[in-house]
Amino acid sequence: MAEIAFSFAIALAVTALSGLFLLPALRRLKFGQSIREEGPKWHMSKSGTPTMGGIMFIAGILPAIAIVGRAYMGQGDYSHFVIFGFALVFGGIGFIDDFFKVRKKQNLGLTSIQKLGLQLAVSAAFIALLRYMGYLTTDIYVPFFDVTLRLDMLAYTLLALPVVAGMVNAVNLTDGVDGLCTGVTLPVAVFFTAIAFLWNRGGLTVFSAALAGALVGFLIYNFHPAKVFMGDTGSLFLGGAVCGMAFVSGVPLLMIIVGAAYIWEMVSVILQVLYFKLTKGKRLFKMSPFHHHLEMKGWGEIAICAAFFAATVALGILAWVGVSNYLNV
């Protein structure tokens, strides 16, 4: 338990302190968020709020896993750095996207095709690396049913690639109101911390605890009214982190359960587009993703975050029940 506390505390402290230096720097550089014109009109007041704040929790996680995870590296367990590296590359894709947005002073960065191509390439490299380092089997445990599907490497990879890309983009879509993506990912990180600790996955325990601590530190600045946004730098990093934790845990399907809030956000966008086309202009939701629908219905940002947070905690409990036989609890 001490390693969880240390990793959590270091990441929280470094993230919180980094904000004191990063926010003034982002303001000086005029790295402000450009708000989508098709979004809620009242969001226009947020235009100019510093973005790329994901750098803060990325900076907070690194020293935590380096310091607390040293003992595991001595035992040959580098999984915490593998997950961090995977998430960092996704964060790098987001950084490029953010940089183009602030440079052009509009909410347009990399194209969807460019993002997807980069994400699929990174995902394939990650899966191959996990397999090479012995952190990945091609057996897929199915929660609740207590069965294991045995696949060859090709079939596993072909299934995993769209799942990873889809989840990373779903996390990205969840970053739409102050503190939402941060608040949803916090219980996900706590869930994987508990799973990893129970099953003695040292590197995963250190990383997920650090992620939880860093998100708490970031909420100091990102809670409504937000002083900084994480940007695609942060949301794509978090998407990669969620996928990394799930695959290293050995039960990747867990992220579909505990991360169902992310998935619903993406599904709401897909349903909106399909319904609009099929009905020649009618809308299923007032606005998508779903958190904007709630805003248009009169929900405040804090209420939306609280509802998503509570739902994700409940999903974490459900996921725990679904995998209890696998974990022998």
Image: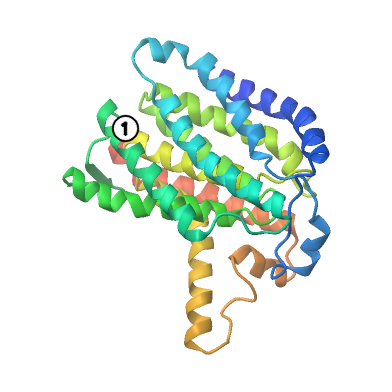
Up-down relation of residue 305 to residue 266 (above or below): above
Q: Furthest-bottom residue in view?
A: 280
Q: Quadrant of residue 216?
A: top right
In-front residue for pair 260/88: 88
Which colour style is shown?
rainbow
Name the residue type under label 1. Answer: Leu
The number of discs equals 1
Q: Percent position (x, y) of residue 71?
A: 43, 11
Residue 249 lies, in percent from the top left, at 36, 35
Number of other residues with Cα within 10 Å of mark 1, as a class: few under 14, some 14 to 19, many 20 or more: some
Q: Is residue 121 left or right of residue 209?
A: left
Q: Is residue 95 visible?
A: yes
Residue 136 x/y as whole percent: 28, 34
In the figure, 235 relative to 7: above or below? below
For the question of whether residue 260 can be seen, the reply is no
Q: Residue at x 23, y 36 (%)?
A: 137
Kindly identify the residue that appears in the image at 75 percent across and 61 percent down.
300
Q: Which residue carries the number 1 mark?
A: 129
The structure residue drawn at horizontal position 64% and vertical position 48%, both measured from the top left corner, is: 98
Q: Secondary structure at mark 1?
A: helix
In the rendered view of the protein, which quadrant contains the C terminus?
top left
Q: Position of residue 174 (x, y in %)?
A: 58, 55
Front one among 228 and 186: 228
Q: Which residue is more in the foreground, 275 or 33?
A: 33
Residue 130 located left or right of residue 287:
left
Q: Nearer the viewer, residue 54 or 217?
A: 54
Q: Residue at x 39, y 40 (%)?
A: 246
Residue 110 lies left or right of residue 195; in this view the side is: right
